Image (spheres, rainbow, N blue to C red):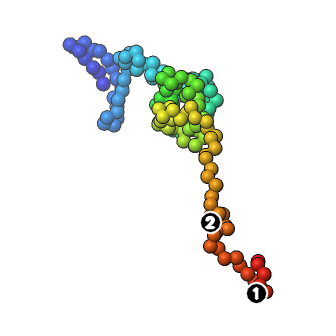
Amino acid sequence: MKLYHDIKLVATHPRQIFPGQRSTVDEHMPPEAIAYKMQDPQWCLKQAEDIGPDCHRLIRRLFAHKVLDNLRAAQGVIRLGKKYGPDRLAAACARALHFDNAKYRTVKSILQQGLDQLPLYEQPNVIPLASAYTGRGRFLRSQVCREGRPL
């Protein structure tokens, strides 16, 4: 396809086969779009490695299936480091991996709620059960054998 402006050839794009397909020439893109396009999977993996091993594992998990489909998610995870810092991002990635939920939305939610700053292996407050629930209930009759002695 050829594009003209005032009878002057401005750009040439390859013809697309299916309706809705796009064809963009890099020279026509704004600088921030070109910078975003340059953030390929290898770039994401390198950035994640610089942040920490948990972030690197999370990005590798994202890229385990359908790399290009998860590229935006990986770029988003890396971009969260600019807002929250690399230490908090690494902690959020560790928490997401601990709960086996390696997704951009999960990491973002962890950071927004400040869950990355809580201990990962926190012991829940355990309340001891009453004797009624531990097998020695108040109204439980003891079993007696035929000879009259307890079992």
Question: Which SS class for mark 2?
Answer: helix
Q: Give x and y (percent) for residue 142.
A: 70, 76
Sequence order check, earlier mark of 1 and 2: 2
Q: Residue at x 25, y 17 (%)?
A: 4
Q: Nearer the viewer, residue 3 or 44?
A: 44
Residue visible at 36% across and 26% down?
A: 23
- Residue 51 image position (x, y, % from top left): 59, 24
- Residue 123 in picture, x, y percent from top left: 64, 44
Rendered location of residue 97, percent (x, y): 59, 39
Look at 35% across and 29% down and name the residue there: 22
Which amino acid, mark 1? Arg
Which residue in the structure is indicated by mark 2?
132
Lateral position of residue 21 relative to residue 99, left or right? left
Quadrant in which the C terminus is drawn: bottom right
Alpha carbon distance from label 1 to label 2:
26 Å
Q: Quadrant of residue 46?
A: top right
Q: Which residue is at the front of the view, 49 or 129?
A: 129
Image quadrant assignment for residue 21: top left
Instruction: Return the mark for residue 119.
Output: none
Amino acid on which disc 2 is placed? Ala
Farthest residue toward the bottom?
146
| Residue at the disc numbered 1 | 146
The answer to whether residue 102 shows anywhere in this view is: yes
